[in-house]
C-alpha cells in the first residue's frame, strides 16, 4: 500500500519513529531514536529478534582504536577506507565508505562501553584488510551483540511487534512516507494469513530489513548463477519484499547484482554452520587452500571474499583447506565442534589427508614445502598472501582438513542512501520520511564486502538513521 489512508476500519498504532527489522542496524537505530526523545516501535516478521545478525560471528572492523595502538598496529580510517574501496573494485560510493570508516572506532566503542558487549582481547585480520582491525565478541557470535542490544531496548521500554510482516508504505498526497501497512500474526511458512494493521509515523520510518540472500527468485534474477543449487548462509527471513516495497515508491536501486559468496563455507553442512570458524580464522590466516585435482594452491587465502570465492568456483569443484595443529594452537580457537560434526577432519599424516581427499600425495608434499619456505622468508612469491606474525610452517601433526565451496552470504546491493541515512529517489533527492540502514541498502561495499565490515556499517548507519529520523 503506498497511498494516503482514506478512512476505513483498519486498526491504527502510532509512534514517532517506526523501525522495520530487528538486526544490528534496526536495534541501533531504535536506541538512538529513543535517546533523541522519540517514541519508537520496532516491526519484526519473525518470532524473535536478530535475523542474520544472530548467526554472524559478530566481528566488527574498527580503525585507530586504543587496542590497536597498544598492540603496535598502525591503522587509520584512511587506510580502512582504501581497503574497502579496493575490495569493492572502486564502485563503492565514497561518501558512504568514508562515513563508515570515519565512525568505525566510535561504533566499536559504543558497543563495548554503552551497550556492554564483551569483546575478546585478540585483534584479527581477515581477507582484504591491510592490518588487524577486527574485534570479535566473546562467544564468537552475533547473538552476543543482539542480546546486549535487546537488553538496552528493554531498559528503554521500546516496543517490538513480533510476527508482524511489513507489506507496504503509506504516503500522503505529497509523497511523504507517513506510516506502513503490516500483517499481524504473520507466519513466514504460511504467508500473509494474519490481520492487516496500519502503523503511523509522526516523524519517519527506518527500513532495516536486511538483505535477500535467501530469496532464490530475486537473487537469481540479478545473478543467474545463484539458483537453488547454491546454498546460502542466510536465515530463511532474508528475502526481498521490503526492498521491493522501497523500489515501488521510487527509491533508487544500487548494485543489486553484486551478491557476495562466502569462500569459507563447507558443502558438508547446511547454512552458515561451524566450518567457517576453522577455515576463516585458522586456514586462511595460517594454512593453505588447494585444488584437489592438482594438489596445488591457486589463490591468496587472505584475498577478499569475492576474489577467493571466484577462484574456488573456477576450479569447478570443492577445494581443500589445510592447517596443522600448530596453526590451531596459535589461533586460539576451539575446533572441537567442527571435528565432532565431521566438517573438519583430523589426519595422522599428510599422506592420510591426501588419500582421504583424493589428492596426489607427491603434489601435496611439494605444495606444503613451497608454502613453508614462504613462511620462513615472510614472503609469498606465488600469491602475495600476507605472512602474519603467528604463522608457522605446516608440519606439526596432526593435520586438519575441510572441504570448501562458496555459499551466498551477503547482498551488497539495495536502496541508495546518503551519509545521513536518508533514502534517495531516482533523481538523487531524499524520499521524505524514509531512512534506511544495513544490508537493505547498497553502495557501501561496492562489488565485494570485506569481512567484519557489515556490522560496522550496521552500527554506524543504524545510529545515524536513528538520530536523524528523530529530528
Image (cartoon, grey):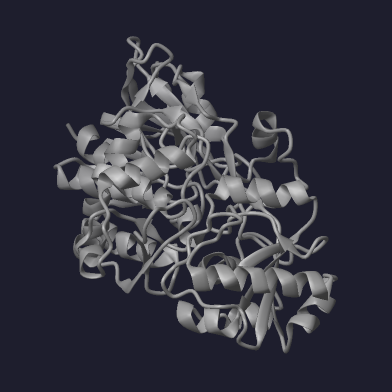
Residue 280 lies, in percent from the top left, at: 54, 64
Left or right: where 400 falls relative to 45: right
Q: Nearer the viewer, residue 252 or 176?
A: 252
Which residue does the image show at 36% across and 58% down from the upper left?
131
Rendered residue at 66%/74% (across/down): 369
Q: Where 379 falls versus 51 (above or below)?
A: below
- Horizontally, residue 355 falls left or right of residue 172, namely right
Question: Which residue is found at the position 77% from the left and 65% from the top?
Answer: 295
Is any atom of residue 26 visible in this view? no
Placement of 465 over or under 111, stated as above or below: above
In the drawing, does residue 378 fall left or right of residue 121? right
| Res 394 quadrant in image | bottom right
| Displayed quadrant of residue 421 | top left
Q: Position of residue 214 (x, y in %)?
A: 63, 46
Horizontal and vertical percent for residue 450?
46, 49
Image position, residue 142 (x, y; %): 43, 62
Q: Residue at x 59, y 73 (%)?
A: 372
Height in image: 45 above or below 149? above
Q: Nearer the viewer, residue 62 or 321?
A: 321
Which of the pair 22/415 is nearer the observer?
A: 415
Q: Is residue 95 visible?
A: yes
Is residue 351 positioned above or below 85 on the image?
Answer: below
Numbered circles on residues, count: 0
Is residue 69 or residue 271 the one in the foreground? Answer: 69
Quadrant of the frame with the C terminus = top left
Amino acid at each position: 500500500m503506498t497511498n494516503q489512508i482514506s478512512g476505513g476500519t483498519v486498526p491504527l498504532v502510532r509512534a514517532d519513529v517506526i523501525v522495520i527489522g530487528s538486526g544490528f542496524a534496526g536495534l541501533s537505530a531504535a536506541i538512538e531514536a529513543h535517546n533523541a526523545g522519540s517514541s519508537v516501535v520496532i516491526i519484526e516478521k519473525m518470532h524473535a529478534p536478530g535475523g542474520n545478525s544472530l548467526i554472524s560471528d559478530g566481528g566488527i572492523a574498527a580503525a585507530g582504536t586504543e587496542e590497536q595502538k597498544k598492540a603496535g598496529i598502525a591503522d587509520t580510517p584512511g587506510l580502512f577506507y582504501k581497503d574497502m574501496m579496493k575490495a569493492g573494485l572502486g564502485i563503492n560510493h565514497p561518501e558512504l565508505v568514508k562515513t563508515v570508516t570515519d565512525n568505525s572506532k566510535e561504533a566499536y566503542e559504543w558497543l563495548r562501553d554503552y551497550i556492554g558487549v564483551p569483546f575478546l582481547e585478540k585483534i584479527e585480520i581477515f581477507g582484504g584488510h591491510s592490518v588487524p582491525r577486527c574485534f570479535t565478541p566473546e562467544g564468537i557470535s552475533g547473538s552476543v551483540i543482539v542480546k546486549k542490544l535487546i537488553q538496552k531496548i528493554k531498559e528503554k521500554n521500546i516496543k517490538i511487534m513480533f510476527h508482524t510482516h511489513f507489506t507496504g508504505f503509506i504516503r500522503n498526497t505529497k509523497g511523504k512516507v507517513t506510516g506502513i501497512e503490516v500483517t499481524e500474526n504473520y507466519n513466514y511458512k504460511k504467508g500473509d494469513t494474519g490481520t492487516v494493521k496500519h502503523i503511523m509515523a509522526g516523524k519517519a520510518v527506518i527500513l532495516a530489513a536486511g538483505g535477500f540472500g535467501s530469496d532464490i527468485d530475486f537473487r537469481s534474477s540479478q545473478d543467474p548463477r545463484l539458483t537453488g543449487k547454491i546454498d546460502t548462509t542466510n536465515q530463511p527471513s532474508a528475502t526481498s519484499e521490503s526492498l521491493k516495497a522501497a523500489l515501488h515508491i521510487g527509491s533508487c536501486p544500487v548494485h543489486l547484482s553484486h551478491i557476495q559468496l562466502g569462500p569459507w563455507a563447507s558443502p558438508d553442512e547446511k547454512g552458515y554452520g561451524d566450518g567457517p570458524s576453522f577455515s576463516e580464522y585458522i586456514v586462511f590466516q595460517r594454512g593453505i587452500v588447494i585444488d584437489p585435482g592438482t594438489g596445488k594452491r591457486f589463490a591468496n587465502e587472505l584475498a577478499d571474499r569475492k576474489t577467493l570465492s571466484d577462484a574456488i568456483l573456477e576450479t569447478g569443484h570443492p577445494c581443500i583447506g589445510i592447517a596443522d595443529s600448530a596453526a590451531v594452537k596459535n589461533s586460539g580457537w576451539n575446533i572441537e565442534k567442527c571435528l565432532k560434526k565431521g566438517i573438519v577432519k583430523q589426519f595422522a599424516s599428510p599422506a592420510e589427508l591426501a588419500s582421504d581427499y583424493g589428492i596426489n600425495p607427491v603434489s601435496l608434499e611439494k605444495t606444503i614445502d613451497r608454502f613453508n619456505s614462504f613462511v620462513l622468508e615472510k614472503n609469498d612469491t606465488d600469491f602475495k598472501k600476507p605472512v602474519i606474525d603467528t604463522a608457522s610452517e605446516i608440519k606439526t601433526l596432526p593435520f586438519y582438513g575441510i572441504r570448501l565451496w562458496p555459499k551466498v552470504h551477503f547482498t551488497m546491493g539495495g536502496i541508495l542512501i546518503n551519509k545521513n541515512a536518508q533514502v534517495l529517489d531516482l533523481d538523487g533527492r531524499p524520499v521524505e520520511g524514509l531512512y534506511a540502514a544495513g544490508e537493505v541498502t547498497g553502495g557501501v561495499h561496492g562489488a565485494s564486502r570485506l569481512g567484519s565490515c557489515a556490522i560496522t556499517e550496521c552500527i554506524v548507519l543504524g545510529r545515524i538513521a536513528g538520530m536523524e529520523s528523530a529530528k
